[in-house]
Image (tube, rainbow, N blue to C red):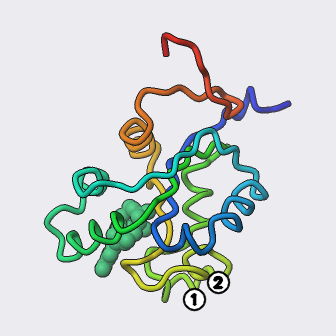
Amino acid sequence: ELSFFFPKEQTLAVIKPDTLEEHKDEIIEQVQDEGFTISQMKETVLSREMAEEFYKEHRGKPFFNQLVDYMCRGPCLMMILSKENAVEEWRAMMGPTDPVEAQEKAPDSLRARFAKDILENSVHGSSSQEQAMEKIKFVFGDIAVGPDGALQVDADT
Ligand code: RTP
Ligand code: MG
């Protein structure tokens, strides 16, 4: 077991509204087939406030209000995924932001298959370990995940 030398990393993955209704089981199955551990998951309808906070780095951009509308219009599935290089590997599974580019460069990616357009692009993934830690804390509060990807349930963590 080499996981001691290659400790797992966590990322926050979100299946966005509509895609969740249409492709939930298929995406979860693929996540597991790709070797991710789903350390935690929670289905939730974001409030406008939460969606604005979640995407606060995009506040002021021309698509911000539409992005918030989209994220709030139905349930999202929030997942903590654990795997070596989880951040990068989940981004690779997602494909580029714009599905036109995704179809060109990564035709098997989730966005190539399921995104409607650059806004309604079906999935979210943290873009760095720092962002992953911030978003995991925002969505799930203070929780700790062990090196094997399992949740630590110690009361003091
Ligand atoms: P995400 O944060 O959702 O994983 O997406 P990303 O890193 O690939 O792209 P980012 O630049 O962080 O954009 C966040 C989300 O905003 C919407 N968007 N719309 N209309 C547009 O030009 C546009 N650009 C971005 C998408 O929903 C994108 O995922
Ligand atoms: Mg992003």
Q: In this view, does 144 lie above or below 104?
A: above
For image coordinates 35% across by 68% down, the residue present is 73
For image coordinates 64% across by 83% down, the residue present is 107
Residue 105 location in percent, x, y? 58, 83
Badge 2 marks a residue whose secondary structure is loop
Choose between 65 and 45: the one closer to the eye: 45
Circle 1 sits on which residue? 104
Q: How crowded is mark 1: few (under 14 residues within 10 Å), some or many (20 or more)?
A: few
The quarter of the displayed image where residue 127 is located: bottom left
The answer to whether marks 2 and 1 mark residues whose Cβ atoms lie closer than 8 Å is yes
Between the residue at mark 2 and the residue at mark 1, the CA separation in whole angstroms equals: 6 Å
Badge 1 marks a residue whose secondary structure is helix
For the residue with label 2, is its CB less than 8 Å from the closest atom of ligand 1?
no
For image coordinates 57% across by 55% down, the residue present is 88
Q: Is residue 150 above or below residue 56?
A: above
Amino acid carrying label 2: it is: Pro
Choose between 135 and 26: the one closer to the eye: 26
Could you say which disc has been placed on residue 112 in the image?
none
Residue 26 location in percent, x, y? 71, 68
Indicate which quadrant contains ligand 2: bottom left
The quarter of the displayed image where residue 39 is located: top right
Choose between 7 and 20: the one closer to the eye: 20
The quarter of the displayed image where residue 153 is located: top right
Quadrant location, the N terminus: top right
Residue 61 location in percent, x, y? 18, 70
Residue 103 location in percent, x, y? 58, 87
Q: Residues within 10 Å of mark 2 (few under 14, many from 20)?
A: some
Amino acid carrying label 1: it is: Glu
Circle 2 sits on which residue? 107
